[in-house]
Amino acid sequence: MSPAVLHDPTALLGSLVLLLSFALLAGRHPYALANALAAQSVLLACALAWLALRQGTPPLALASALTLAAQGVAAPFVLRRQITPGDRRRWTEPVRRRFASVVLGILLVAICASVVMPMRFPAGALTRESTALVLAVVLLGLLVMILRRQAAAQLAGFLSMLNGVMLAALELAAMPTVLTLTVVALTLISCAVLGVFSVGIRRIDGGRVAA
Amino acid sequence: MTAAALFLAGPVISLPLLGAAVIAARPARVATGWIAFGASVGAFLLSCRLPGAALQDDVILLDPLAAHMTMLTAFVGATTFWVCRDHTGDDVDRRGGGTRHALALICLGATLAALMANNLGLVWACMEAASGAAALLIGLPRTQPAARAAWRFLIVGGAALALALFGTILLTLAALPVLGPVPAAMSWTGLALAAPAAPASLLSLAFVFLLVGYGTKAGLMPLHTWLPEAHAAGPTPMVAVLTGSVLNVALAVLLRLRAVVAVNTDAIAPGPPLMLLGLLGLVLAGFTLWRRDDARHFFAVSAVGQSGVAAFAFGLGGAAAVFAGVLHVTVHTLARTAISQCLGGAVFRGGGSRFADLARPHLPLALTLGAGIVAVAGLPPFGLFSSEFLIANETVRRLPLLTLPLGLGLALGGWALATRLVALLVAPNSERGPAPNLADLVPAWLHLAGVLLLGLAMPGAVVAWLTTIAAGAS
């Protein structure tokens, strides 16, 4: 099969990941954030699994399962568990800021594209389009972390940023070992952060962190 | 990994980790502090073998810069574990002492590994391990400020390291067509060879992400917010010293990165962004210092400013500026550690960490703290004066216009420190609490003596050594 054809499914999944970054940016309630994060992570795990299948690398398949378990299942679960039914209102962000965040996000994507598109790239490894896409996912995760004040939302942004970095590593498909190590390391980090979050959230000022 | 590298670097890294394992596995809480102290002293003594060896393989890089920073970090770690060998002189609750020492040892081991690694991926992983251990250490007092500081540290540091990893991936991609196999494309030595022929745009993009990522870990100004909070919340000397070591690792990474990117003439010039971040940090820290009343916050902000000075020197580039920058990192680390070690006792005895509460606790302690402040302020008899003078000299010679912000930042910071010094010395003598154990002050004296020696009469051997480092890193 030709490399161009092989590249297609990852590109499609990558664009969906970017779309879900916007869902994360626009989400008002932690439930929405948890759902967006879960969907994003599942897509990423699918991309990883597809690559593992194509290359026939069992460790990568294992890494994709790890990602699915940590980012796709455990993280949304922990995020949801923080919210007691009584104080739903407290967790909802104002609408005005939400609109502004989406506009900022669109601007950010435009900037990413305009920065990356004129670049000259070495043949084979990574295309311009996928670099711009991955860059946008990483920076949108960062934007969520910067714009939100709640620890839960910051955590969701952070995990989505990790998803972006994993997607970047995915583009290094020629190096399955590096990719596998990266995915495993990032999954471990997300587990550690999730652990600290779920143990310490009550002391982090009831979920609010002043920036 | 070659046998020689394993023989030289292996024990330095594994001794602290082994110490942590012993502390964690030990059934009763006996001699925790002594085990930690022994492990860190062993690491320091073993690291003294490094300067003679110049070797590189696919995992370990032992050049003069790595040897120097490793020795410095191990020394500072060892003296701090001496101060923390039992829990006096520390205001945090005394339960959980074993956990604290074990985490601090893990952090130290990971920091040392990051300094000697010849692989950007490995550097990143070690930084991440050190940050994780440090975050848990900061959150250990189980109070709300500590939990918030730990969360901030974890989330800001995590985001920074995620950006750094993204930069690492881009850098690897840039070097890949030139070098081929992956381990070579991620090693410092390989990158130096590949940089001239690597695609300039990709190299520039990678540099920006690595600068933001490791710049955050180095406490450069717009990205420094995690540092003061972490210093103020955690168990005093340990956290301050260990996060200080992380600062130094990040500065060393930035110095190496600068050398790699500077080789490629089509790529972004690495000097100006570094200089800009450094100057911004120095000047803003100079202003912020005036508004800080909490002693721990105050010295953390001062560390941000001094880190900015070092970044500025590294950005300036050239053998003379790098010489001055490495000297600055060295003397500032020694002086800052001396202050942290005194501050634990002073805060404990004064009953609060505001300057007004410190109230001249006991004469030897107050005098040591005062000498430390004089040193950090960059006043003449101490080594920081020499390094700052060298940096200013080089600035005047090459970029005279930048002397203005540099001088402004140095003067503002020094002035703020001098004001606090006067306030500390004219305050009434409170004599609260038990008298300090003079043995706890010995490390601070040792550090300050070193800083004084480097300021008054730098031995020829040290000059030659720093010249070698600068020649290798610029």
Image: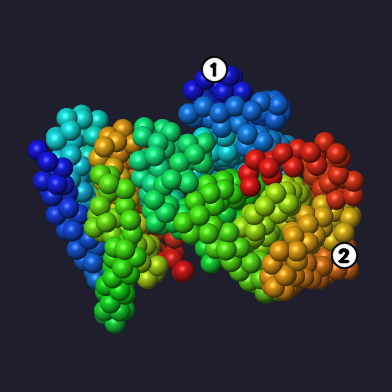
Q: Residue sitting at 87 percent across and 59 percent down? A: B380
* Residue closer to the observer: B2 or B419: B2
Q: Which mark is residue B425?
A: 2
The span from disc 2 to disc 1 (Cα, nearest Å) is 55 Å
Q: Amino acid at mark 2?
A: Leu
Which tag, 2 or 1, sits closer to the chain's start? 1
Identify the element where label 1 is drawn: helix
Q: Which residue is mark 1?
A: B3
Q: Residue sitting at 67 percent across and 57 percent down? A: B313
Quadrant for residue B310, please give it.
Answer: bottom right
Residues marked 2 and 1, same chain: yes
Residue sticking out furthest to the bottom: A96
Quadrant for residue B311, please give it.
Answer: bottom right
Q: Residue sitting at 46 percent across and 56 percent down? A: B266
Q: Write down the chain letter for disc 2.
A: B
Residue B50: give x, y in percent of width and height.
67, 28
Q: Amino acid at mark 1?
A: Ala
Q: Is residue A166 visible?
A: no
* Residue closer to the observer: B234 or B67: B67
Identify the element where label 2 is drawn: helix
A30 lies left or right of B130: left
B82 lies left or right of B141: right
Q: Write down the chain letter for disc 1.
A: B
Q: Residue sitting at 25 percent across and 30 percent down? A: A59
Residue B121: give x, y in percent of width and height.
43, 39
Residue A86: give x, y in percent of width and height.
26, 68
